[in-house]
């Protein structure tokens, strides 16, 4: 029996279809992420061709596996019914198998993980909603069963007929071929389960430390902070077993600067990371980092996360073990993610071990939630670390609550209006490309389905809480919970049109700059709430003091332990902050603000070998000068806004006005005078 045509044909069909998809996709922007000057992209033309060819190769491999199934199915049918071979029909079977399997996987993703689809969808999102309405877990199960039976049925039947008539070789070869598909599926999806055996008590001198953070998690979403929607039952329970800090302020509501301040206990001016776009020549952190200090005292240090945690791998914080993606702000990395249509096809098949190993750029694609995957990896890592004869420090950071606020089933519909059928059905609309984000930043509240966006965000918050529950339950089962400093945090919050804008780091509101911070360590901390104003730079010294380790003298934060243990010491600290880069004309900002070019002009690639995106040196000074800055003390926040023609100081009561809508400086001149002394001093030392 000549099988070559049944193998060559599907491969040829797959290569042709893959090339057609690649050519069509190449008409769009060749990369994901922020817009970059065309001249810069053109300098990476050769690399772009390599990146596109690489994705085309993987797409042809995936298509070949599907087409081969259709071709062997056709072989089985013509042998069973004694048809004459027809090349056109063979090609049609190949195309039909690719279409059928891809469509089935597409529908599964649309229902269970719609962000996988919409993050790379180049067409009208509204077209997807009528399709989604036809889906359910049962219907998808039936659809999968039909597709499997449709293609495997003839092959199994033909194999059994060969075995019946003692043509064992043909029958067994075909069955062996067919068995490869479930084997490939299992290998792609297989995850080893963490050991839940209770560990023997160890006499470590120092406690274990676990930090769990979700990017863009607002403090006001927690029940312990007054939210009544039951979004965070697990986090609220953990808070009742430790300390909840109700007013923790970050220095910049952008990930890289905020995370670095957490891990160095210093202001951004000191550690040097004031933007997300930092060049290779600026990555070195000159102050001691928390992981490095812990390593000096015998700790194993580790970090695990999704695309939001790329900064933990970009900078040398001192993690021994890093289960992290590469730096996201890198043109080569973004080129390897490819244009949307090709990216969409591959994304359907890469949320698994295959994608994680061969195409990590798509596995860690921004906007696609990996909450459960990161949770699983974290538990597995905790189980391994807990068996060692050393204490460990693990930082878990995920994008569960990051915009566009997509989440998996059932979370994206958990709090939504059942009758809503708008463009933000699956995730916040209009933010899937850099150009869309700029337009969205400039658009007013009336252009968005704000209620639905909040529903999506609330569902994302609940998904994070459920993952925290699994991790916390696991450390209890293996018996290390009470020997572990357990911390829940975020890098910043987000404005969701409470004022004139949305996003983070654009204005100095409480929604963007106040974060959740909870510490559980029952050996020292008893149930309490601290509502004094504190700073995120105070966390690292607190961790070290809880572990019995001295803090470096050049750290700028102060331990919070006195506030926790002694209620009489709970005075407000002065918390300082500044805005990030404005990538658009943000509504509500002063017309006379210090302006600078768009991101398109601001960015460059200094080192073409690495591809790292960074701010051009000539713009750094004006970017820092243009930042609004604030001091927060108790309920009062004084905001300084530099203008072309001078400056503005405004005062807000953030307890009653967290969106900073009403300036109270005229009614409270003494408070302004007092806070201005502190703020001006900080500005003088941080410009």
Image (spheres, rainbow, N blue to C red):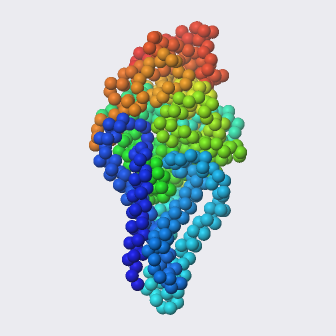
The residue positioned farthest toward the bottom in the image shown: 165
Q: What percent of the width, then of the height, locates residue 360? A: 42, 52
Residue at figure coordinates x 57%, y 40% from the top left: 429
Q: Quadrant of the C terminus?
A: top left
Residue at figure coordinates x 57%, y 68% from the top left: 147
Going by the image, does 390 lie left or right of 655?
A: left
Corner quadrant of residue 2: bottom left
Of residues 22 and 555, the one drawn nearer to the viewer in this rendering: 22
Above/below status of 71 relative to 57: below
Above/below status of 181 relative to 343: below
Q: Quadrant of the N terminus?
A: bottom left
Corner quadrant of residue 550: top left
Q: What percent of the width, then of the height, locates residue 455? A: 65, 40
Q: What percent of the width, then of the height, locates residue 264? A: 42, 32
Residue at figure coordinates x 53%, y 51% from the top left: 117
Of residues 570 and 357, the one drawn nearer to the viewer in this rendering: 357
Residue at figure coordinates x 56%, y 30% from the top left: 443
Of residues 316 and 611, the one drawn nearer to the viewer in this rendering: 611
Total tally of numbered discs in the picture: 0
Q: What percent of the width, then of the height, locates residue 673? A: 54, 9
Q: Is residue 131 visible?
A: yes
Q: Is residue 338 visible?
A: no
Above/below status of 616 relative to 468: above
């Amino acid at each position: 029996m000549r099988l070559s045509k049944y193998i060559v044909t599907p491969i040829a069909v797959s290569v042709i279809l893959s090339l057609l998809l690649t050519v069509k996709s190449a008409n769009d922007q060749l990369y994901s992420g922020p817009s970059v000057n065309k001249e810069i992209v053109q300098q990476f033309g050769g690399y772009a061709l390599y990146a596109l060819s690489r994705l085309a190769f993987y797409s042809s491999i995936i298509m070949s596996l599907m087409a081969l199934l259709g071709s062997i199915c056709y072989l089985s049918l013509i042998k069973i019914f004694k048809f004459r071979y027809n090349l056109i029909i063979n090609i049609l079977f190949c195309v039909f198998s690719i279409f059928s399997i891809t469509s089935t996987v597409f529908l599964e993703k649309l229902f269970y993980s719609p962000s996988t689809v919409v993050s790379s969808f180049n067409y009208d999102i509204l077209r997807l909603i009528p399709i989604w309405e036809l889906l359910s877990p049962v219907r998808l199960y039936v659809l999968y069963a039909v597709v499997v039976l449709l293609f495997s049925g003839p092959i199994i039947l033909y194999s059994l007929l060969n075995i019946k008539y003692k043509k064992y070789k043909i029958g067994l070869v075909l069955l062996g071929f067919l068995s490869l598909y479930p084997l490939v599926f299992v290998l792609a999806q297989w995850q080893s389960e963490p050991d839940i055996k209770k560990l023997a008590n160890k006499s470590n001198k120092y406690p274990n430390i676990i930090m769990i953070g979700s990017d863009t998690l607002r403090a006001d979403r927690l029940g312990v902070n007054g939210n009544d929607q039951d979004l965070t039952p697990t986090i609220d329970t953990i808070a009742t077993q430790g300390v909840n800090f109700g007013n923790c302020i970050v220095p910049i509501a952008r990930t890289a600067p905020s995370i670095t301040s957490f891990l160095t206990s210093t202001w951004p001016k000191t550690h040097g990371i004031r933007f997300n776009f930092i060049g290779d020549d600026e990555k070195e952190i000159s102050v001691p980092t928390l992981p490095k200090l812990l390593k000096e005292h015998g700790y194993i240090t580790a970090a695990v996360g999704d695309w939001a945690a790329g900064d933990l791998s970009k900078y040398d914080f001192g993690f021994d073990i890093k289960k992290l993606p590469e730096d996201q702000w890198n043109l080569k990395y973004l080129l390897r993610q490819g244009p949307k249509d090709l990216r969409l096809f591959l994304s359907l098949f890469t949320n698994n071990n295959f994608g994680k190993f061969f195409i990590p750029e798509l596995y860690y694609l921004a906007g696609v939630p990996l909450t459960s995957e990161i949770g699983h990896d974290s538990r597995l890592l905790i189980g391994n670390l807990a068996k060692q004869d050393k204490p460990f420090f693990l930082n878990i950071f995920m994008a569960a609550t990051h915009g566009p606020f997509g989440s998996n089933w059932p979370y994206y519909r958990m709090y939504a209006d059942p009758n809503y059928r708008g463009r933000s059905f699956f995730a916040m609309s209009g933010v899937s490309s850099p150009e869309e984000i700029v337009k969205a930043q400039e658009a007013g509240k009336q252009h968005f389905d704000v209620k639905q966006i909040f529903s999506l965000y609330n569902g994302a918050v609940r998904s994070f809480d459920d993952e925290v529950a699994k991790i916390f339950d696991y450390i209890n089962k293996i018996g290390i919970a009470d020997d572990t400093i357990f911390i829940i945090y975020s890098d910043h919050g987000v404005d969701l049109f409470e004022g004139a804008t949305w996003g983070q780091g654009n204005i100095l509101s409480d929604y963007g700059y106040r974060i959740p911070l909870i510490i559980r360590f029952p050996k020292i901390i008893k149930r309490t709430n601290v509502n004094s104003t504190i700073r995120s730079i105070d966390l690292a010294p607190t961790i070290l003091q809880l572990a019995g380790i001295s803090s470096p003298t050049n750290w700028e934060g102060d331990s919070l332990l006195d506030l926790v243990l002694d209620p009489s010491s709970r005075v407000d600290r002065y918390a300082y902050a500044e805005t990030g880069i404005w990538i658009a004309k943000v509504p509500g900002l002063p017309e006379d603000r210090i302006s600078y070019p768009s991101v398109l002009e601001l960015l460059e690639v200094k080192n073409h070998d690495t591809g790292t995106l960074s701010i051009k040196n000539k713009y750094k000074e004006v970017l820092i000068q243009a930042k609004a800055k604030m001091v927060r003390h108790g309920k009062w926040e004084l905001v300084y806004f530099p203008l072309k023609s001078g400056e503005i100081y405004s005062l807000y009561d953030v307890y009653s006005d967290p969106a900073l809508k009403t300036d109270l400086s005229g009614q409270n001149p003494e408070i302004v005078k007092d806070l201005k002394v502190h703020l001006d001093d900080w500005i003088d030392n941080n410009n």
